[in-house]
Image (tube, rainbow, N blue to C red):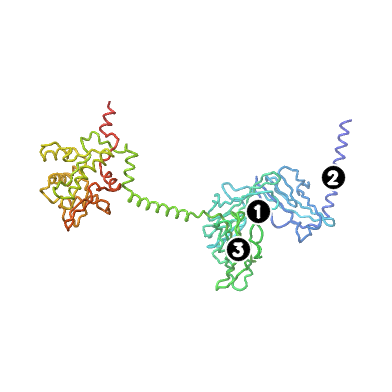
Amino acid sequence: MAVGFIALLTLAWTIRVGAASQNETEVLDLCIDHGVPFDRVFAVPHEAALLDCELVKEYLLDYLNIPYNVTWYDQRTGQEISGQENHIVLRGASLLFLNITMEHQGQYLCIVRTPKHCYKQVRVLRVEEMVFGACRRPQAALQQMQSHVNDNLRCPLSDYTRIVDSYSIRWYKGCELLPKWSRFHESELMLHVHQVSPNDAGFYTCRMTFNISGNIGVVAETIECGITEKRSKRPQMLEPTDDTMKVFPGSPVNKTCRVFVPVKGVHMTVVVWVFKDMYVSPNTSERIHQGPQVEYQEADGWWVERSLLVSQALPDDLNLNFTCMALSHRGSATGYFTLQPADPNLLLPIGLLATTMALLFILGLLLYRVFKVELVLLFRTLFPFFYASTDGDGKLYDAYVLYPRIQGDTLSEAVEAFAVKTLPQVLEGRYGYRLFIFGRDSLPGQAMADMVEETMNLCRRLLLLYTSSSLSRAEDSSWFEQQTGLHRALLDDSLSVMLLEMEKLSEQTILPESLRLLRDKQGALQAWEKRRRWRCSRIEEDGEEDKTSLSSFKLSARFWRNVRYYMPVRGKAKSYKKRKLLLNL
C-alpha cells in the first residue's frame, strides 16, 4: 500500500511539473523575441565568462524609471538559473560563470519583464580549449597602435569592472609579464606605451583577478596588436608623458597639456584635465583649476594646449595622477603626471658647511701660524709620553751656551751677563735644562781645543749668541768655539744650532759666510726685534755714557717660549732599545 501511495505522489508531481512547464513555455512564447545577437561570448576552461542581457538598454526601455526583472534560462534544459548553482553568480542583468567547463557551452535565454511588456533574447557561449604551448587565447581582439608616438591598448574586460567588487590587472606580451617602470605603464584598463616602435607588434594579454561576493575569479583576453606607419588623424599627446614633478608643499604648480591633432581644417578636439576621476573646474577661484583651451594651426595640423594650475600644492595632492585627456571623434589620447615631494634642498646647508669648514681651516692655519710655538709647548707639556726620553742618549747637557767674550765692548759685556746670569736663571732654574757655560762649568787649566770638542759631544744643542762684531774678531776668546760649533752644524751636521741675534744688524754681509748660510737656512731668534724695553750701557757719540743698567736687560715671555721651542724636548717615552730590553727580561 505504501508503494502505491508513493507512485501516486510521483505521478501527481510529474503532471504538475509538466503543466507548469507548458504554462511557462506559453508565457515565453508571448515575449517579444529579439533573436540571437551576432556576437558570441568566448571563454576557455577554468576561467570566468560573463553574459550580459543586452535587452536592458536605454534605447529599449527606460530602465531607470520603469521597474523590471531579469530571468536567465539554460536553453538546453529549459531550467531557470537561480544563481544558487555552483560557480554561478547573478548580478543585475548579468550572468557570471566563475569556473567554465566544456559543459557550460551552449545558448542561454534572457527574459526581461516589465509591468506591460516581456522581452527575450538568446546569448551564445562558446568554450574553446587552449592551444598547447600557446600563451594567448584562441580568440583575439584586433587593435592598432601608431608608430613613433605615445599610444595605448585597452583591455576588453570593461564589462567585468561594472559588476565585480574589486579587481587587479596584469599585462603580458606573449608569455612574458610586462615589467613595471619601463616604456609600458598600466593604468586601470589601459596599457600606455611610450614611443611605439614596430617591434611592439604582437599578442598582448590582459589578465584580471577579481573578487565578487567573496568568490575569486580569473579572466583574460588577448589583443592582437598591429603597428601602423600610416599617419593617424587621432590626437597625439606630447605633454604630459607619464612623468613626475617634484614640488615642495605649499608651492604653486603650472603644467601645460600639449596635444597635436594631425588634421587640416576643423579638428573638433577637446582637451580637459581630470583629477581624482573628476573634471578639473575652469573656475579660477578654485585651488585646482584649468585654464582656457588654446589652439593654433600649422601646415600639418593643430596644436591644442590647456594649462593646469594649482595655487598651492597640498600633501593630499602628492602621488596622485593629474590626467590630461584629448577627446575627438577620431580617437582619444591621454597623458598624466604625478606630483611627488621634492628632495630636501641640501645645497644651502652643504654650502654653509663647506664655507664654515673652509673658514675654520683658514682660522686654524692662522692660529697655528701665530700660536704655533705656544701650541707645541702645550702639547709637549700635556703629552710628554709621545716624545722619546733623553735619558741614556749619551748626552750630559741640553745646550752649549756660546757667547762673545770681548774685553772693553759694552754690548758684548751685556750679552755675557745675559748668558751667564739670565739664561741659567730661566732655562735651568725655571724649566730644568742643563746648560754648559764656559767659565762656569769648565775646569781651570784645561786645554781649550780638547775641552770644546769633548763638551760639544756631550751637548744636544748649541746656543750661539752673537752681535754684529762678535763673530768677525779672531782675537776673541770664543772664536775657536764659534768655528768648532759652526763646523759641526754645517759640515758634520752632528749638532743643532740655535742662533740668538742680540743686536740689529745693519747689513748681513758683516757676518761670516758660514753664519750667513746657517742663518738663511734656519733663521735666528732676534732678541732686539720690536723691543725697546732693554738697553745696555754704551758710549754715545758725544762721549757721555748711557746710564741704563745691565740689570734692565730683559726679554718678553714670547722670546723665552721661542727659546724653549728650539730646545731639546724633555720626553718620557722609553726608547725602542729600552723597551726591547724590558720585554726580554
In the rendered image, which residue does mark 1 sit on? 157
| Among the two numbered marks 2 and 1 on one chain, the one whose residue lies closer to the N terminus | 2
* For discs 2 and 3, the disc positioned in front in the rendered view: 3
In the rendered image, which residue does mark 2 sit on? 18
Left or right: where 541 falls relative to 264: left
Q: What x and y, as percent, mark residue 557? A: 30, 46
> Are the two marked residues, 2 and 1, in contact with CB atoms closer than 8 angstroms?
no
* For discs 1 and 3, the disc positioned in front in the rendered view: 3
In the rendered image, which residue does mark 3 sit on? 309
Residue kind at label 3, given as amino acid type: Leu
Secondary-structure class at tag 3? strand
Identify which residue is drawn at 86% across, 35% down: 7
| Among the two numbered marks 2 and 3 on one chain, the one whose residue lies closer to the N terminus | 2
Secondary-structure class at tag 1? loop
* For discs 2 and 1, the disc positioned in front in the rendered view: 1
Q: What x and y, as percent, mark residue 162? A: 70, 53
**Number of callouts in the render?**
3
Secondary-structure class at tag 2? helix
Mark linked to residue 47:
none
Q: What x and y, as percent, mark residue 505? A: 20, 55
Crowding at label 1, few (<14), some or many (≥20) Cα neighbours within 10 Å?
some
Whether residue 244 appears in this view of the structure is: no
Q: Quadrant of residue 308?
A: bottom right
Figure quadrant of the N terminus: top right
User: Which of the pair 585/374 is nearer the observer?
Assistant: 374
| Among the two numbered marks 1 and 3 on one chain, the one whose residue lies closer to the N terminus | 1
Q: What x and y, as percent, mark residue 418? A: 22, 45
Q: CA distance from mark 2 to mark 3?
A: 71 Å
Left or right: where 473 falls relative to 53: left
Residue kind at label 2, given as amino acid type: Gly
Q: Quadrant of residue 275?
A: bottom right
